[in-house]
Image: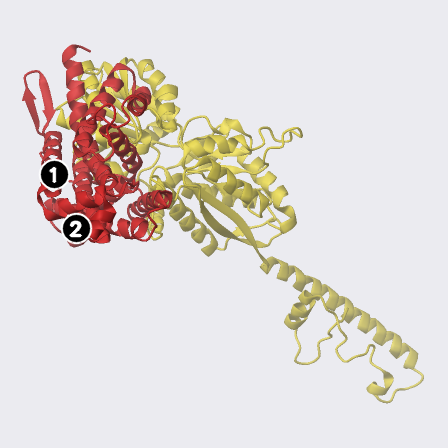
Chain colours: A red, B yellow
Amino acid sequence: MGVVDYIQTIIDGALFGATYSLIGIGFTLVFGVMQRINMSYASTSLAGAYCGLMGQHLLGLPLWCAFPLSIFASGLIGYLVYLTCFRFIPVASPLASLMATVGVLLFVEEMIVRATAGTPHNFPAIFEGNSIEIGAFVLRADLVGVFLVGVLTMILLMAVLFRARLGVATRAVAQQPIAAQLCGMRLQTVNGLTFVIAGLLGGVAGAMTGAAVGILSPLITIPVTVKGLIVTVIGGLGSIPGAIVAGLMVGAFENLFQALRSVSERDIYVMLLLFAFLVLRPGGIVSPGRGRD
Amino acid sequence: MLLIIPDRGSNFTSIGRTLNAGFFAYADGGFPPSETRRGRCNPGTRLEEETSMRKSALLICSALVAAASLARVGAASAEERTVYIDGFGAKSGVVRSLGINSEAAMRAAVDLINSQGGVKLADGATGKIKFEYYDDRCVAEEGISIVRRMAAGPTLIGVGPSCSNVTEPLYGILQKKVGDATDSGLQFPVFTDVAIKIGLAKISEWSFRNVPSETEMYTTMYKWVKDTHPELKTLYAGVEENFSHSRASWYAVQKDAAPAAGFDVKGVTKWLVDDTNFAQQVREIKAANPDVLAVVAHSFTTCGLLKEMDRQHVKVKMLIGLTSSAIQETLTNCGKVAEGITIPTSFALLTPEAKAANERVAKYNGTLDIHSAGTYEAMFILKKLIEDQGVLAKPDTVQADRVKIRNGLAALKTTDGLLGTVDRTSDREAVKPYLYIAAKDSKWVVMHDMIKTKQAAN
């Protein structure tokens, strides 16, 4: 392989990493507000995408409807996850919430398997088959689309968090929950809305993952969960821009390691990268190296 | 014991019923009939008469005993026992469809057998097959646990599992060599229906399989491709590296079969069973520019790779697929980009038997395909063996019956299959009839019928 091939490999990986970024943003958003990890996030995102497909299969809706339906369904599922795993579990029992979300992850995965008999289902692609050629490099148009959607989503999320009243409340609850309550903010409402926003974002992520892969299968639930968590940690727990950068980086490194070594060793190096960040830069990629707090 | 002597209005049916219950009775409380009841008699002939009556009574008694015995035999013939055959495979998880189709095929076969009178047992009794299907979730530990439970109960034989990664360790807990007193492995026959990874049955003499031989199928297929397309010279392979069947199919079968047929193997690209990004692999294929691409992967990643090839506009002159991908799922998910992919398979709806079986299985919400067809056939093989090997299906003959079934399976040279006669090898594997099919307009069409070719050669 020549230099061009390696660069192309990195570009391919980074573009595919856009789907990891979207999942990572969802993980990090919930953690940023509640200081909890929602392990079921990736599976509920994909469940939302499956719900999007149901519009076509059960209601005969056009294929494009899969995208808004996925987002809506995922938002709803996000709120249900909040109710079942966070709302009634005491704040002092973070482990209980964590295990509850693991339970939801397995439950949702099994529900998908039951509903589909484990059979993969085609998901509509965006810009199917098209590619953008820049000199010697070829970019998958659909992945560029996913990347742009990821960036747009991040901008929108930032706008909500820093411009809207809901965002102010969300940040206030994340920073000082008791003070926020004393100022009249309803903690449960803000937390619930955070889960809905994260869920909507998850719907985008699930739909974009489905569009990028072209097929939805229960097979991809666990790998997407693992990648999302890695991205969240590398990006810095709670950091949205970090999740975006880390997603692209993990995708690129994954592809590069695969090209340099082999597919069977690929994940070893990704895990080593995670380990390196945990040891050398535990605050994540966009945080200052030391004394972050 | 009581004996009922029939009076008027009585009949042998009632005797038989009573005898079956194990009771004998005198009908009117006494025998022989007393003089007083017979009325007045001539005292001179009394002794002779008494002797004669005793002889008559003895004769009647003998006749009744004989009749009762006949009735008992008749009753035994009508006796019905239960033959327990259990299936197991993945009914949850991502390969759930394998278990669903296997269970449907088994239920369809069992119901047909039972509706046609069941199986004839060695002592003339009738056996009705009772069937349960267990979910091993494609996890080795689960599969082993299920088989241990079966072995501890009345199950005659276990049919399954569906995953090769369950089959291999499962065979490992069976007794390796029959009669080896030093081996405490399970003495329980397992007849595997779906798991296709080559050469597994040699692990234990209690293990048998009814799956196609990939060695046979791919060896002849590569030769056929070379014969029919001599212009094709180079081959590149894409292998699902962490799936035991895919790995075995390439490294133990196709890797040797392709060069043996005259192909120059340019290289191998690899991916994992749950991979979703194939950009790198497709670029490797593009760089190698092979005439033939062998996609040694299951439907999910086969479709992923072919879609990426379409995106990168990479084309090869011929696509060869893994036998497990010769299913509807491939056409549904990527029929357009899989156009022309040619795959050897041991099942197609070619014969009236196969079509009828497919209709029966559909009633149980399953599909008959390369995997479940083997399951369906297995049940009829077992029916024949139960009848031929003198299985009794009594609670105290369970282990003896298992040995009979094992020995019967081991002695089989051929069996009847949905597409024709299936040969059986000495290492307990099957060599099933097969053909080559290709995807055309999102349908599987037969490219070459090896069954007819072999018949013509013979």
Chain at numbered mark 2: A
**Which image quadrant is residue B55 in?**
bottom right
Mark 1 surroundings within 10 Å by alpha-carbon count, few (fewer than 14), some (14 through 19), many (20 or more) = some
Kindly identify the residue that appears in the image at 22 percent across and 48 percent down.
Answer: A179
Q: Which residue is mark 2?
A: A55
Q: Position of residue B246 (x, y in %)?
A: 35, 26
Task: Point out the residue furthest to the bottom here.
Answer: B40
Q: Are marks 2 and 1 in contact (CB under 8 Å)?
A: no
Q: Position of residue B147 (x, y in %)?
A: 52, 41
Identify the mark at residue A158; answer none if there is no mark. 1
| Element type at mark 1 | helix
Towards the viewer: B200 or A216: A216
Residue at x 57%, y 38% (from the top left corner): B188
Chain to which the residue tagged by mark 1 belongs: A
Q: Is residue A284 left or right of residue A148?
A: right
Tell me which amino acid carries mark 2.
Gly
Q: Nearer the viewer, residue A131 or B357?
A: A131
Quadrant for the N terminus of chain B in the image: bottom right
The image quadrant where one finds the C terminus of chain B is top left
Q: Nearer the viewer, mark 2 or mark 1?
A: 1
The residue lying at 36 percent from left, 16 percent from top is B256
Quarter of the rendering containing residue B328: top left
Residue at the far top in the pictured view: A2
Along the horizontal axis of the image, is B198 left or right of A32? right
